[in-house]
Image: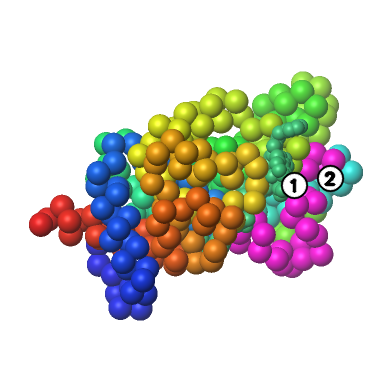
Amino acid sequence: MWITRSQAPAADTARAIAAAAGVLRAAQRVVVATGAGMSCESGIPTFRDALTGLWARYDPEELATEAAFRRHPARVFGWYAWRRRLVRAATPHPGYHALVALERFVPELVIVTQNVDGLHRRAGSRRVVELHGSLDRFSCVDARHPFPAAAAPEPAEDTECEPPSCPECGAPVRPDVVWFGETLPAQATAEAWDLAASCQAMLVVGTSGLVQPAAQLPFIARDGGATVIEVNPDPTDVSAAAHIICRGPAGVVLPALVAALTEGAAT
Ligand code: BJW
């Protein structure tokens, strides 16, 4: 993979990338744990970036709850419709394609993501565990009856939007994501926890490590003997668990990591 001079990582990051490549080369099972920063360079704001436009006056942590949806269904449904539009307009950046390429170098590679944007699957990653649900699925707020995505309203404007009603029970329909105070999907959680405890390397990309229980994953991997590698331009709560820290954006560091593995494979 070709890296231009402007995309080349700084010298200390380049050293960390070389060390990370050595760890990945020796690993049988690798988990890539991703958060909102993974999608930043695709034009999707992180969860904790300040909101813009109509949503600027709201705190995302106060919109991402069932209580907020029940109090202001049109506001919360409209916010998610706006985010779905951003995601549909986005394309996976080179870091996503690098994670697909990484599958060639590792016997078993699994992505465990907190993201709800579906970009890993769109890029072509084969094994993706979604911990916080998906923007593309819907269910009613009371019984969680599934609701077809094709029937969900898609406002063309950045606006509040009344949610549809469940055809089975009449309750308002919500996005099938995991809000604060809700439990994570049981099967995805069990799989992620097993993988974290049994991998030889965990690459943690673009998460602040603030949100539980996903924030435990790097610590579980470390306790299980894995080498933890962080990819993030800024220090985070994950940094304490990391053996190797690649300070830089995912769209630069991940392609450089694949380039280092490719060069190593050629020699
Ligand atoms: C780049 C970059 C570039 C920038 N390249 N990087 C224990 C202690 C304290 C609190 C709790 C606890 N246990 C549970 C809680 C409560 C709560 C919680 O964790 N709160 C914290 C805020 C304190 N957790 C929950 O409620 C969870 N449920 C639960 O525990 O249930 C158990 C239970 C239930 C009932 C009763 C009792 C127990 C559920 C959490 C669900 C989180 N859901 C959300 C919303 C999903 C839908 C949506 O997107 O709207 O998930 S919240 C939000 O945060 C979203 C994200 O997936 C998640 C994580 O955010 P992430 O990915 O880390 O993003 P950011 O924005 O924080 O960080 C971005 C990073 O990218 C930064 O580091 C940048 O530097 C970096 N970056 N550019 C690489 N180019």
Image quarter of the C terminus: bottom left
As drawn, is 22 to the left or to the right of 119?
left
Circles 2, 1 touching at the beta carbon (< 8 Å) = yes
Say if the magenta span includes residue 245: no
Disc 2 secondary structure class: helix
Estimate how packed mark 2 is, as few (under 14), some (14 to 19) or many (20 or more) residues with alpha carbons within 10 Å: some
Residue 154 versus residue 58 in the image, above or below: above
Say if the magenta span includes residue 45: yes
| Farthest residue, direction left | 267
Query: Residue 148 — which label?
Result: none
Q: Quadrant of residue 103?
A: top left
Q: Which one is nearer the viewer's eye here, 102 or 17?
A: 17
Residue in the picture at 67% in, 26% down: 146
Residue 57 versus residue 185 in the image, above or below: below
Estimate how packed mark 1 is, as few (under 14), some (14 to 19) or many (20 or more) residues with alpha carbons within 10 Å: some
Tally of numbered tags: 2
Q: Which residues are magenta?
A: 44-69
As drawn, is 157 to the left or to the right of 116?
right
Residue in the picture at 35% in, 39% down: 200
As drawn, is 76 to the left or to the right of 198?
right
| Farthest residue, direction right | 71
| Farthest residue, direction top | 168
Residue type at mark 1 is Ala
Q: How is the image coloured?
A: rainbow
Residue 199 versus residue 91 in the image, above or below: above
Q: How far apart in space, not on screen, are marks 2 and 1 (Cα)?
A: 7 Å
The answer to whether residue 138 is visible is no
Query: Residue 64 — which label?
Result: 1
Q: Percent x, y for residue 167? A: 76, 25
Disc 1 secondary structure class: loop
| Residue picked out by circle 2 | 68
